[in-house]
Image: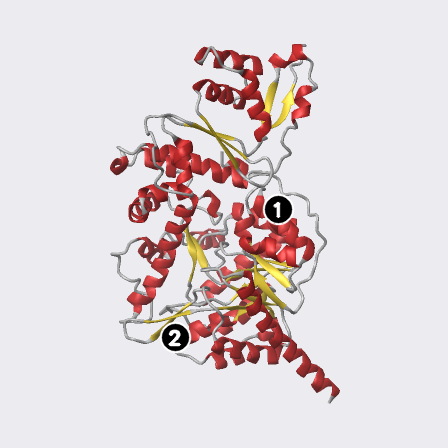
């Protein structure tokens, strides 16, 4: 019975490539699709998780096709296990490619994380040590994905709750090196920067200032929850279930001052709010993008 | 030559992987936190975030795939059943639609539920619903296509079923139990009655039809198995001499469970 889900030839694309503009976008949720289409919502782009569109047909594809007719789309993978020790799952890569071929997204991205180990998929973005050995493996996996889909992917910096004894690269150096060696671009998740910085006791501003922002092609923004670890140190959780924190908005502005406007996505994956709440978050991101564009223009005039 | 042999023999195949300990501890709440983690003294709570993310996300995914089983079992029972299931059948791929396909057969053999076998049948119907939801798109057979066929050829017709079409045959009232995803408990439910669910998806919404008669179930099962219309009717009549073929044919056409029809070559 599963064969009808697993196989099924990829449909030839009905869409022309449509670049993702340097505007605010929103992570697409099925419950918002009808409102978006009925109101012709003014949003720069929508991002989808590739894994949700790997079925053969039905409502998910019909909804996404209608969205894609009116908006640029970015495809974000959450299950490639780029940071895993095992080889990339070829079946999964083929399904990923089919989604990219079918919807011709403006951007394609994945994570610096692992989720599959020894043939078990853990359904989470798990952390990896930063060593020369893991670096070589990650680069090899990115090469394989880029070769298969025939285009550049962006790799997202993780939010983490632990670090590893064997790590001897800083995260920002590691990200710069994988971009340099594989030719991938970077997706800069500002909330992840903040969550990891607080969890591991370093300055998020210093991290941003050291980051290879010239390789960044997209930004993510999301909300986080606040907890404490066993030693009562602050422990932030990348929960994607609430508005973006004010500290993260401030870091977003800091990034934009160096990069200029970039496609900037608001993610809200748990306790998903009404469309109006989500659209307001996107408007807030858009106003910051507008501000930075204006300040660049003002500087040019001056 | 010698050099290359030496080079080859120096290649070590690692059978222990760096993520082994981390991965193993994710599913085992009693396992110690992996030693490679830096945060001494604070690592437990930090590692538990990953543990929770993994286990809770899988419990939620399984519950979302089997909402009626979850409603009937209750959250706590379902969670216990689901943990036992995940320990045996963790997901193998990142395409989460595939996760849970062994759940119906797991429930059938699950000792704590040996008095609630109806849950296994219900789980199979829910699995079929999910498969129908994601099945390939195909135009259903239009009723007109059928009416234009000469009467003498009708008995020999063989149908192609739509990629979404499934038939959940049960000794239990699986159609009524399926409604638990919307509303539970159902009053006046007779666990001794048997039902079959026909599951289709003519366009984008999954359609379910509850069939009560054994003759109609036999008819639908034969059609799906590729028997001719004539032999499906004959078989159904054996179950029930009053079987009404036109009602069953109308059901087939109305639900969009078919996608094609082929006429026999020899007529």
Locate residue B13 relative to residue B261 in the image: left or right. left
Considering every residue shown, the one lying at the far right of the view is A301
Q: Is residue B131 above or below residue A233?
A: above
Classed neighbour count for the residue bearing mark 1: other residues with Cα under 10 Å, few (<14), some (14–19), many (≥20): some
Could you tell me which chain the residue with mark 1 belongs to?
Answer: A
Q: Residue at x 60, y 70 (%)?
A: A283
Residue B243 vs residue A174, the one in the foreground? B243
Q: Residue at x 58, y 42 (%)?
A: A58
Name the residue that disc number 2 marks: A200
**Residue A120 visible to the viewer:** no
Can you give x and y, in whole percent of width and height, for residue B65 in the image? 43, 44
Can you give x and y, in whole percent of width and height, for residue B182 in the image? 42, 43
The numbered disc on residue A62 is 1
Could you tell me which chain the residue with mark 2 belongs to?
Answer: A
Q: Are marks 1 and 2 on the same chain?
A: yes
The numbered disc on residue A119 is none
Indicate the secondary structure of the residue bearing disc 2: helix
Q: Are marks 1 and 2 in contact (CB under 8 Å)?
A: no
Can you give x and y, in whole percent of width and height, for residue A213 in the image? 58, 75
Q: Is residue A150 above or below residue B118?
A: below
**Residue B79 visible to the viewer:** yes
Quarter placement of the C terminus of chain A: bottom right
- The first of marks 1 and 2 along the sequence is 1
């Amino acid at each position: 019975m599963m064969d009808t889900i697993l196989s099924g030839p990829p449909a030839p694309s009905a869409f022309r490539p449509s670049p993702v503009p340097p505007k605010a976008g929103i992570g697409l949720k099925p419950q918002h699709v009808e409102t978006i289409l009925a109101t012709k919502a003014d949003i720069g782009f929508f991002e989808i998780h590739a894994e949700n569109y790997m079925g053969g047909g039905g409502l998910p594809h019909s909804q996404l096709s209608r969205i894609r007719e009116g908006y640029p789309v970015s495809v974000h993978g959450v299950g490639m296990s780029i940071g895993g020790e095992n080889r990339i799952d070829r079946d999964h890569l083929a399904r990923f490619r089919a989604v990219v071929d079918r919807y011709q997204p403006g951007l394609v991205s994945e994570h610096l994380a692992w989720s599959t180990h020894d043939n078990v998929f853990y359904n989470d973005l798990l952390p990896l040590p930063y060593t020369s050995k893991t670096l070589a493996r990650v680069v090899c996996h990115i090469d394989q994905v880029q070769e298969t889909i025939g285009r550049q992917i962006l790799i997202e910096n993780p939010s983490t709750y632990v670090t590893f004894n064997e790590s001897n690269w800083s995260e920002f150096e590691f990200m710069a090196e994988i971009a340099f060696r594989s030719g991938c671009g970077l997706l800069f998740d500002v909330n992840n920067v903040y969550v990891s910085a607080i969890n591991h006791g370093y300055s998020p501003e210093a991290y941003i200032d050291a980051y290879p922002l010239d390789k960044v092609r997209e930004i993510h923004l999301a909300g986080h929850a606040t907890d404490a670890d066993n030693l009562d140190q602050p422990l932030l959780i990348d929960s994607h279930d609430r508005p973006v924190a004010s500290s993260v908005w401030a870091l977003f502005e800091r990034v934009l001052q160096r990069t200029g406007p970039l496609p900037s996505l608001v993610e809200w994956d748990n306790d998903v709010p009404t469309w109006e709440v989500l659209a307001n978050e996107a408007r807030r991101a858009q106003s910051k993008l507008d501000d930075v564009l204006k300040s660049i223009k003002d500087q040019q005039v001056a | 030559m010698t050099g290359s042999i030496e080079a080859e023999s120096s290649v070590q195949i690692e059978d222990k992987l760096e993520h082994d300990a981390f991965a193993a501890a994710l599913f085992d709440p009693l396992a110690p936190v992996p030693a490679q983690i830096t945060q001494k003294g604070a690592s437990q709570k930090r590692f538990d975030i990953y543990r929770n993310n993994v286990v809770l996300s899988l419990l939620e995914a399984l519950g979302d795939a089997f909402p009626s089983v979850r409603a009937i079992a209750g959250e706590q029972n379902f969670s216990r059943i689901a943990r036992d299931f995940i320990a045996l059948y963790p997901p193998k791929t990142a395409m989460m639609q595939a996760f849970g396909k062994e759940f119906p057969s797991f429930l059938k053999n699950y000792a704590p539920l040996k008095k609630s076998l109806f849950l296994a049948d219900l789980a199979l119907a829910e699995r079929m619903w999910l498969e129908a939801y994601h099945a390939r798109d195909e135009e259903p057979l239009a009723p007109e296509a059928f009416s234009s066929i000469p009467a003498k050829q009708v008995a020999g017709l063989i149908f192609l079923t739509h990629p979404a079409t499934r038939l959940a045959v049960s000794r239990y009232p699986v159609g009524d139990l399926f409604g638990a995803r919307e509303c539970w408990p159902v009053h006046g439910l007779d666990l001794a009655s048997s039902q079959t669910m026909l599951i289709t998806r003519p366009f984008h919404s999954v359609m379910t039809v509850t069939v009560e008669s054994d003759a109609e179930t036999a008819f639908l099962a034969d059609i799906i198995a590729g028997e001719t219309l004539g032999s499906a009717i004959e078989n159904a009549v054996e179950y029930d001499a009053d079987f009404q073929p036109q009602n069953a044919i109308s059901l087939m056409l109305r639900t969009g469970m078919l996608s094609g029809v082929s006429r026999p070559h020899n007529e």
